Image: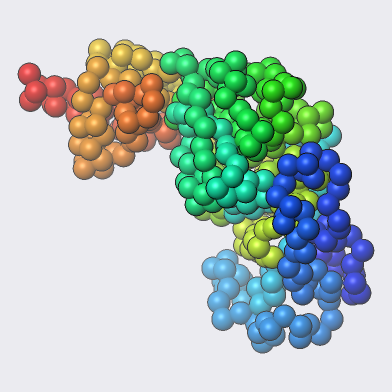
Amino acid sequence: MCSTTTTTGKDNDDTTKKPKIGIASTLARPNILSLQPYRCARDDYDEGILLDANENSLGPTSLPTTSIKDNHNNDLVLERYPCPFQIPLKEAYATYRGCDIQHENIFVGVGSDEAIDLLFRIFCVPGVDNVMTTPPTYGMYKVCANVNDVEIVSVPLTPDFDLRIPEMLEAVTDKTKLLFICSPGNPTCKAIPLADIQKIAESSSYKGIIVVDEAYVDFSDKGSAVSLVKTHPNIVVLQTLSKAFGLAGIRCGFAIANDDIIQLMNNVKAPYNVNKLTSEVANNAMKNIATLEKNIKLLLEQRECVTKALEAMDFVVKVYPSDSNFLLVKLKSLALEVYKTMADNGVVVRYRGKEMHCEDCIRITIGSEEENKACLKKLEETYNMLASKSS
């Protein structure tokens, strides 16, 4: 931990201990288990005359706008590298999520994507191991698999976007190191029951890691897989400040898991992966949970209003039930044309018609009341215009 009192070598360094005995030690690549992680200067000392990290001790050439207005206040000491451990942020996030999670159970990274990539690099041997996905799902799993030369085994969701657990367990092998479950799903907007996740975690057929991607969990009333982490050492939960917290611009995400897995993620990550500006905003967010809850409430109210308005439109075939801050909407036809025309006229939704089980579907994010009204109006105008031209 980067304290303000320690001036000698630290004895609470959580990145250089020998790997703990746990599921990680049985599944991780041998070279990762034996890895000696890069030690940054601030691992050991963070006070005194610091001439050890090739920093510019004269100070930064630029400061945050708020600091410039405030008599060039440099409270963040931006000429110095950030704390590599982010213990205060981890502790605040652990308190918020509960479930007896401690800071040792939390990895902080650049969005959830850094955690996804690290899990591939830690557990999957390129050209040998594989991972399982359940399409339609988040596209970054496939990207990371391709980058890391890892085969993908796909077991699609049902048309109602439920897991096909028997087929999944039949398809895994001893080379299947990661199994990704996006819940609530993107683009499905549907949460997977915790009982389903627990069933896979406790199955004798699968010996790998279950990665539950919960970017949208704060919009769901179905519960979080964080509640399973302490009793299931093979579950990793991914979360982010990008969605409900409204902080996509700071790129801050978390992995929550057994401490042996988190230790390896800390060993493999870049030395200063979370910058001071991101850390400051993230810590402030943990002190403003009332604002978070207020905004979630407003978005859920708007989700209900938009759902009802869409269901009243005669060209809308289905509005899928949503546990997230967006809706998946199936049109009678012309979904791609509607998407392109709306975008050309200043209202951008997302075309999802190429995804499995999502033919003629668009995805609509829930915005402010004004944005939602404008979107609904433009959608109706656009579809009617295109339908009249094609008839």
Looking at the rendering, in which quadrant would you find the C terminus? top left
Q: Residue at x 81, y 73 (%)?
A: 46
Task: Judge from the rendering whether residue 227 lies leftward or rightward of residue 276; answer left or right.
Answer: right
Looking at the rendering, in which quadrant would you find the N terminus? bottom right
Q: Is residue 128 above or below residue 191?
A: below
Q: Position of residue 137 (x, y in %)?
A: 48, 32
Query: Where, by quadrant of the figure, is residue 237 drawn?
Result: top right
Task: Judge from the rendering whether residue 156 lies leftward or rightward of residue 168; answer left or right.
Answer: left
Q: Looking at this view, is 263 or 391 the one in front? A: 263
Q: Looking at this view, is 118 or 225 the one in front? A: 118
Q: Position of residue 31 (x, y in %)?
A: 72, 57
Q: Position of residue 244 (x, y in %)?
A: 57, 37
Q: Looking at this view, is 216 or 9 the one in front? A: 9
* Residue 290 in sight: no
Q: Residue at x 78, y 29 (%)?
A: 232
* Residue 262 in sight: yes
Query: Where, by quadrant of the figure, is residue 97 drawn?
Result: top right
Q: Is residue 346 above or below residue 193?
A: below
Q: Residue at x 67, y 58 (%)?
A: 269
Query: Where, by quadrant of the figure, is residue 67 drawn?
Result: bottom right
Q: Is residue 247 above or below residue 302?
A: below
Instruction: Name the colour scheme.
Output: rainbow
Total numbered circles? 0
Q: Residue at x 28, y 20 (%)?
A: 331
Q: Position of residue 8 (x, y in %)?
A: 91, 74
Q: Looking at this view, is 126 or 279 the one in front? A: 126
